[in-house]
Image (tube, helix red, strand yellow):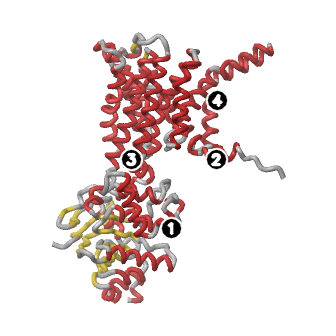
Amino acid sequence: MKKNLLPLAVVALIAALPLVLKDNYYLHLMILFLMWVVIGSAWNLIAGYTGQVSFGDAAFFGCGAYTAGLLATHLGVSTWWGLALGGFTAIAVGLPFGWICFRMRGAYFALATLALNEVLRHVATIAEKFTGGMVGILIMPSFMSKVPYYYIALAMAVASLASLQWVVRSKPGYYFVSIREDQDAAESLGIDTHLYKMLSLAYAAFWTGIAGALYMNYMGFIDPHVVFNLHDISIMAILVGIVGGVGTVYGPAVGAFVMVTVQEMFRSGFFGLFKWLGDVSGSASLVKVAEVLTQAHVLGFGILVVLVILVLPNGIVGDWGKIKRGVFRIKPAS
Amino acid sequence: MSYFMVEKLVKYFGGLAAVNGVSFEVQKGEIFGLIGPNGSGKTTTFNMISGYHRPTSGRVLFKGREVHRLPTHKICHLGIGRTFQVVKPLGRMTVLDNVIAAAYSRVGTHHKAREEALKAIDFCGLMPVRDVLAKALPIAGRKRLEITRAMATRPELLLLDETAAGLNPSELLSAIDLIQKIRANGTTIIIIEHIMHVIMTISDRIHAINFGQTIAEGTPKEVAANQAVIEAYLGTDYA
């Protein structure tokens, strides 16, 4: 019980936040953060625990988002049905894919997931009559305020973490990690590795799909390039996992917070700090530097990720002991 | 019908016959040794028995049932356990977790799996290191973990692939003890071993192969005196 105290306290804190934080901008960032907790945790199960690295999370994300969007445009039902069905659509896409592609190991499987996303993106682009193609899908948001979305995202994040924690402590959890550590040894221990890899994929697809449906509901607009996006979704999912800590329950939650914050810092030029410095000092060159830095946000972001991987190869949660030793290494005065 | 039988087993890798017509029978409760020089096809035979390779032709029968077309995990559930010559510890899991993962093949709940695992760990003498990460174990510990994990799947027939290789003399003695204890527990054992002291001490019968073919079979004494076996191991000069 004591072990769960910190996460519960964090959840309580996040739940209370909208009472004091009224700024829509920060609420938006928090909603994105909570959505990434869901996606990152799902990626973590298939890649971190089962060891089947996926480069194609956007495929499941897009499936969920399009399920929600298409239900609304074709059947006229609420996009919220997508939240219930999006996960299952993603499973329906994921299982046949896994059945075929789990015959491949390691990097070959990862490449196949990359291809799955590209295929789906093209299908969504070409099938214009059905999906609207590049025009995308636009819906009216259900709520004007961000607060309802905030709590829905929070509920999803908590549910996904709770389910992850439950799964990794049960028989499938042991089997997933065994497969990651040595597939041949796992087989010799009576583990149907193909079946358990499929289960792991189904879990990841389900939660990623639900996150996609939430995105449709919240943002109100999707097109193939937004949801089947390699960089913004698939790679981001990997980074959230790696920065937070692969194969740890709370790693991706921490990773999601760090990555959303860092991405926003770079995108906004450290929340306007550069622009402000330039304005205050009145130096034209500093304004120019600020402008260039802001434009190169993807580059800065990339360098930061490289540094994290070099210094903390097991992620923030995985290397927490190392961080503690490094930060609190205060030697007594001699 | 014998307890376990390998019948005219053949395995080709491309044009190379790794195993070429090996047949033997194992009786319930015996320790059956499989020997042969490097590359003679011993491990390939094990891989066919445990479902990692499909035989090119021939059959493997366990208690009258054909098992050579079954996937590995089903063979494990039928009661054939194995260890690997090149040890395969689940490195970033503790010894206990390694064995729990194996125990789940027979029981459903975490509580029971843990109980089973602790029993197997105690039986094989790994209690002192149960909370150590598997990758941190020295080679003797890893070899023993292989056996412990296999035992946790409750095998009726256990395939041991060079579990004594790389052990020092005192570790060898305790390995021999363990193998005899496993047999006394009612498990039938087929063992591949290069260390003659081990295989000659513990085997009831020995089957010798070279270049994928049977060259001799019999009691340890008979096989040790066999002309073809001496030739295979020491060359024609000594035969």
Image point (30%, 82%), residue name: B204
Question: Which quadrant would residue A123 be assigned to in this image?
Answer: top left
What's the amino acid at mark 2?
Answer: Lys
Image point (36%, 19%), residue name: A80
Does residue B61 lie above or below B35 as drawn? Answer: above
Q: Is residue A74 visible?
A: yes
Q: Nearer the viewer, mark 1 or mark 2?
A: 2
Q: Residue furthest left?
A: B1
Circle 3: element type: loop
Residue A194 appears at what percent x and percent y?
Answer: 33, 47
Please state the total of marks drawn on the protein image: 4
Mark 3 to mark 4: distance in Å? 40 Å
What's the amino acid at mark 1?
Answer: Ile
Circle 4: element type: helix
> Do discs 1 and 3 belong to a common subunit?
no
Mark 1 highlights which residue?
B139
Residue B94 appears at what percent x and percent y?
Answer: 48, 57
Question: Which quadrant would residue A206 be assigned to in this image?
Answer: top left
A26 or B216: nearer the viewer: A26
Circle 1: element type: helix
Mark 2 highlights which residue?
A322
Image point (64%, 39%), residue name: A307
Q: Residue furthest front?
A: A1
Identify the chain of the residue marked 2, using the numbered disc in the image: A
What's the amino acid at mark 4?
Answer: Gly
Q: Nearer the viewer, mark 3 or mark 4?
A: 3
Circle 2: element type: helix
Identify the chain of the residue marked 1, using the numbered disc in the image: B
Mark 3 highlights which residue?
A170
Label 3 crowd (10 A; few <14 / some 14-19 / many >=20):
some
State the mark number for residue A300: 4
Mark 3 to mark 2: distance in Å? 28 Å
